Amino acid sequence: MAKMWAGRTSGETDKTADDFNSSISFDSRMYKEDIEGSMAHAAMLASVGIIEKSEADLIIDALGDILCDLNSGKIAFDMTCEDIHMFVEQVLTERIGDVGKKLHTARSRNDQVALDLRMYLRAQVGQIITKVKKLIATVTDKAEEYKGTIMPGYTHLQRAQPITFGHHLMAYAMMLLRDVDRLSHSCERMNISPIGSCALAGTTYDTDRFFEAERLMFNGVSHNSIDGVSDRDFCVELLSDFALLMMHLSRFSEEIILWSSWEFKFIELSDAFTTGSSIMPQKKNPDMAELCRGKTGRVYGDLMCMLTVLKGLPLAYNKDMQEDKECVFDAVDTVKKSLDVFCGMISQMKAIPENMKSAAQKGFINATDLADYLTKKGMPFRTAYKISGSIVAYCIKEGYVLETLPLEKYREFDKMFDADVYKAVDLNECVEKRRSYGATSVSNVENQIEIVRKAIK
Ligand code: ARG
């Protein structure tokens, strides 16, 4: 078939070149945005008198029909078209003839594709933000359920200090809240209309870019037409937001994988979000968490792809930029699927408080509290730290824990020790006493829950 751009050239393009050049297999997912953009463009052309009002109406009605027919599956994409823009224009002219050929006045596929992509991603990011908020709500509900459940907190993956499971979960809620914030800001910066930049230099027609931008619900227009068609910063920004979000899911996944192992057994994942082994009958594998962790690498790759495609590209449009879509689309799909499965997995996850508690009772995670006990009685912290360390060493050697070491023994280390030392090293006390802002006590965690719930309202 003759190319829409045939004119300068008349020779046939090679089949391999056609296939290589074609983007309809992946940019067809922007059909709705492409059609909505074209409707606004036709309306703008009529509003400034470049085409007749009756012509614009005809174009807009036909575009509406095409949209319905694509939505319902009545028509399918023609894979011989180079891209979605060519396809829509082709169907339009088939249906309304020459009037359809007026639509592409005062625009280019260069500004058209930039427009479509911004509109498409705007909608997708909206959906992703909703999913992240849903996950935050789920994590926060879990945190509320386990706000009094004591577990060991770790540094260097070594038992460090007593915390609650609720406190630990709320750390993830805070991370995810920043993701929402980042995505919203990136989306706001992205919501600028490039349409009307045309091929690169603007146009000799008396167009109204502001009319089109407003109709398509953009917050403004790009101020430089060359930048308008060359800019893909919004893709890089979103991909980096996605990479960060996936990194958060990946760290969470790693902990879920550890916690569900026999070595920890702090949690039990629901059967609905685990798999078995084809050979080992006892296995219950945390595949969903592992896949989220694995797919994080994939999204990092999408970000690297985008950055590398853009590096060294001269202004303005270059065909290299067609490579922007598959990586962003892949990241969008991956992030959405990961969030869905993650949310389900967390909502059905159950903690095993006894195991958390018994792990917390080993590992001397109340040693800091022992030192603080002496410090509060007037001993300099460094001295108290040293004495507490010696007590821990003695306990390890003799098979005691701080809760069971006899008072006479304590007093052999220092005369400041009294019977109230047992209260000081009691794990519930250790948690409850940590009431500095943001700390692990139940009331502090309740405060964090309240803050997060308010933020996602
Ligand atoms: N399919 C192209 C893309 O995705 C659309 C823009 C093509 N522009 C051009 N001058 N060839 O980037």
Image (spheres, rainbow, N blue to C red):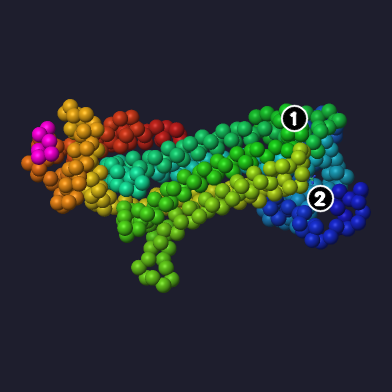
> Which residue is at the front of the view, 383 or 272?
383
1 and 2 marks in contact (CB < 8 Å): no
Can you see residue 317? yes
Q: Which mark is residue 90?
A: 2
Q: Is residue 415 magenta?
A: yes
- Badge 2 crowding class, 10 Å Cα cut-off, few under 14, some 14 to 19, many 20 or more, is some
Measuring from the top left, give residue 356's x and y in whole percent.
27, 50
Nearer the observer: mark 1 or 2; the answer is 1
Dot 2 amino acid type: Gln
- Left or right position of 380 against 38: left
Measuring from the top left, give residue 16's x and y in whole percent.
79, 61
Q: Is residue 243 magenta?
A: no
Question: Residue placed at 41% from the left, 58% from the top?
Answer: 286
Q: Earlier in the sequence, mark 1 or mark 2?
A: 2
Quarter that holds the C terminus: top left
In the figure, residue 376 lies in which quadrant? top left
- Badge 1 crowding class, 10 Å Cα cut-off, few under 14, some 14 to 19, many 20 or more, is few
Question: Residue placed at 48% from the left, 53% from the top?
Answer: 293
Quarter that holds the N terminus: bottom right
Measuring from the top left, give residue 181's x and y in whole percent.
51, 34
Measuring from the top left, give residue 297's x and y in whole percent.
54, 52
**Distance between mark 1 and mark 2 Cα atoms:** 30 Å
Question: Residue placed at 42% from the left, 48% from the top?
Answer: 252
**Label 2 near ligand 1 (CB < 8 Å):** no
Extent of the magenta region = 411-416
- Left or right position of 454 against 394: right
Give the SS element for disc 2.
helix
Q: Which residue is mark 1?
A: 224
